[in-house]
Amino acid sequence: MKKILVTGALGQIGTELTLALRKKYGNENVIASDIRHKASKVIEETGPFHWADVTIPDTLKHIIINYDVDTVFHLAAILSAVGEKDPQLCWNVNMMGTINMLEIGVKHKLDRIIIPSSMAVWGAGVPQDLTPQDSVLKPSTMYGITKVAGELLCDYYVQKYGLDCRGLRYPGIISSETLPGGGTTDYAVDIFYSAIKTGSYSCFLSEETMLPMMYMPDCLKATIDLAEADFANLNHHSDFNVAAMSFTPKQLAESIRKYIPSFTIDYAPDFRQKIADSWPHSIDDSSARNEWGWAPSFDLDAMTKDMLEKLSAKHKLGLI
Ligand code: NAD
Ligand code: SER
């Protein structure tokens, strides 16, 4: 990995992944891109940023050729909740973006491409507790359909063209730097901002909705560790289960109350409840542990403490 392109670099994961990759591989060697024109100050000040629409291959090719890119982290996507509001947009961005990236990977002989998948690949027909690596994939959302198809496409390009393509099925990701972009697990980020700013939160999922989640430092570690793993050791490629913790909104509220005892929560489930109900409660990630040594560091209380410390500091500075 000498020259790296990150698509969707202004998103929740892309922002922090770009900064982590710049720290590791050098600021000038990590090119951020997004369909949004104005990058955040920290992304623009620490390295190159270029506008690109992943549904238009030429916009990506220019960057790949001009910078002699050898590795791509393809993060541009439409997530579950926004995807249910506009399924065609979700199909277009997620599927066209993925196949454009894979075609460019073959034509420009890229060294490797990392394309995240999601726990949204699952639906009916799988055990919801410790959902296994190799299982029935029958999602009920357009987002999930694009993630299943994306995994299959990546594996097809590995088999047919020998392209090195890797991916992991993230659970809900929680972070303190960039707001999430319209998913069903966004409540688990919003709740911290509300706890700091107002001391109360109205949750769009019911109190007993158990979902797998992961704190951003573990998400970055998983993504970079998989990208750096020896391809010869991988039996799976685009669909690694990864897990860190599972909790309900009620359990998260209890964890927050250990630091803010007066925090209150009420529940007003909306259309996202149906999406959450179709996803696992917990995930078996033994293939990732065995094939590339995956192990998370943060549990619920460690994450809550760190989130509250970071967001309180920003709130005091008037940044949130
Ligand atoms: P996000 O919504 O925060 O960011 C996506 C970025 O893609 C945005 O900055 C958006 O402007 C950009 N984008 C949208 N359409 C584009 C286009 N046509 N061309 C170029 N850029 C475009 O998403 P995220 O949470 O950072 O997710 C990154 C990846 O991780 C996605 O593949 C997502 O499915 C996956 N994932 C995320 C989570 C999570 O909890 N955040 C969980 C599972 C999987
Ligand atoms: N966090 C994502 C979402 O809720 C899961 O892929 O859409």
Image (cartoon, rainbow, N blue to C red):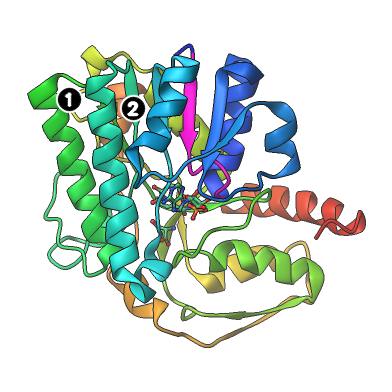
Total marks placed: 2
Residue found 27% across the figure and 59% down from its top? 91
Q: If the image is split into quadrants, where does the N terminus sit?
A: top left
Image quadrant where residue 246 sits = bottom left
Residue 141 appears left or right of 189: left
Residue 139 appears left or right of 204: left
- Where residue 50 sits: x, y (%)? 56, 35
- Where residue 162 sits: x, y (%)? 15, 19
Q: Nearer the viewer, residue 264 or 10?
A: 10
In magenta stretch: residue 9: yes
- Where residue 104 sits: x, y (%)? 28, 28
Q: In this view, does 248 lie above or below 159?
A: below
- Where residue 240 sits: x, y (%)? 28, 37
Disc 2 Cβ-to-ligand 1 distance below 8 Å: no
The residue wearing badge 2 is 113
The answer for how far apart the CA atoms under marks 1 and 2 are is 16 Å
Can residue 207 be seen here? yes
Q: Name the kind of residue labelled 2 in the image.
A: Ile
Q: Nearer the viewer, residue 259 or 202?
A: 202
Residue 19 appears left or right of 147: right
Residue found 40% across the figure and 51% down from its top? 77
The residue wearing badge 1 is 235
Residue 101 appears left or right of 38: left
Q: Which of 247 and 319 is in front in this view?
A: 319
Q: Earlier in the sequence, mark 1 or mark 2?
A: 2
Disc 1 Cβ-to-ligand 1 distance below 8 Å: no
Image quadrant where residue 87 sits = bottom left
Q: If the image is split into quadrants, where does the C terminus sit?
A: bottom right
Q: Give the range drawn in magenta.
A: 3-11
Identify the element where label 2 is drawn: strand
Q: Is residue 63 above or below residue 77?
A: above
